[in-house]
Amino acid sequence: MRPASLHRARWLAHADGVHADAAMRDWLTTPGSLTVRLIAHSRQFRVQKLRQAPNVCLADEAAAIGLARPRRVWEREVLLRCDGAPVVYGHTVVPMNATAQDWPLFSALGERSLGTTLFYDPRVVRGQLEFARIRPGHPLLARVDAALQREGLGVRPDTIHYARRCVYRRRQGLLLVTEVFLPAVLDLAAAKQTMNVK
């Protein structure tokens, strides 16, 4: 694979196409709000905001939000943590032409979950989920690695990372949410079983 192609992921319309094992596929295909499921699988859930500011969108995000090529967007990066452990990296982009009427709460989210806004607003229309393997060399994985390095973790080069993304529409505004699932998410099912036994 040529280095330039690593900047784009192969996004597929069906989770079977990424060949994830059964446990990871179950997380990838979570219906409804991922936040709600993560809360149910942990004693303490937290959204850690890493960054929210203008930036140029990634090469494989532009077309999804109606741009002919990568341009400046509003970008939000978070880690979703369950009982302290980072389990999902979230990356959201919104075109600069979106208005406050389109996404009234986006600029003031802070460390609140974006999912709680998207799934309980009747004006929000959810698009189809897409799925991908994120390979080393992809900019999203580099950002995940940078976030984890700050706490002495980092991304192992031999680990396959799976992701999903979805476009949301509200009024005339588009918003793309990409979620990269970290290996620790697979520990949550076992943790929930232990919690239920006690």
Image: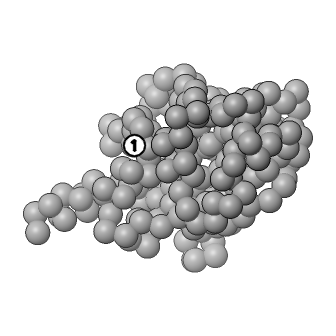
Q: Is residue 98 above or below residue 151?
A: above
Q: Indicate the quadrant containing the N terminus: top left, top right, bottom left or bottom right.
A: top right
Quadrant for residue 32, please give it.
top left
Q: Is residue 13 above or below residue 187?
A: above
Q: Which residue is mark 1?
A: 27
Query: Between 56 and 126, which is closer to the camera in this rendering?
Result: 126
In the image as oriented, which residue stretches furthest toward the bottom? 151
Name the amino acid, label 1: Trp
Quadrant for residue 84, please give it.
bottom left
37 to the left or right of 143: left
Mark 1: few, some, or many residues within 10 Å (few <14, many ≥20)? some
**Residue 173 image position (x, y, % from top left):** 74, 34
Regarding residue 86, the answer to whether it shows in the image is: no
Regarding residue 192, the answer to whether it shows in the image is: yes
Tell me the residue at 76%/47% (across/down). 100
Colouring convention used in this rendered image of the protein:
one colour
**Residue 79 image position (x, y, % from top left):** 56, 62
**Residue 186 image position (x, y, % from top left):** 36, 53
Tell me the residue at 88%/27% (across/down). 68
49 to the left or right of 192: right
SS for tag 1?
A: helix
Q: Indicate the quadrant containing the C terminus: top left, top right, bottom left or bottom right.
A: bottom left
Tell me the residue at 58%/77% (across/down). 151
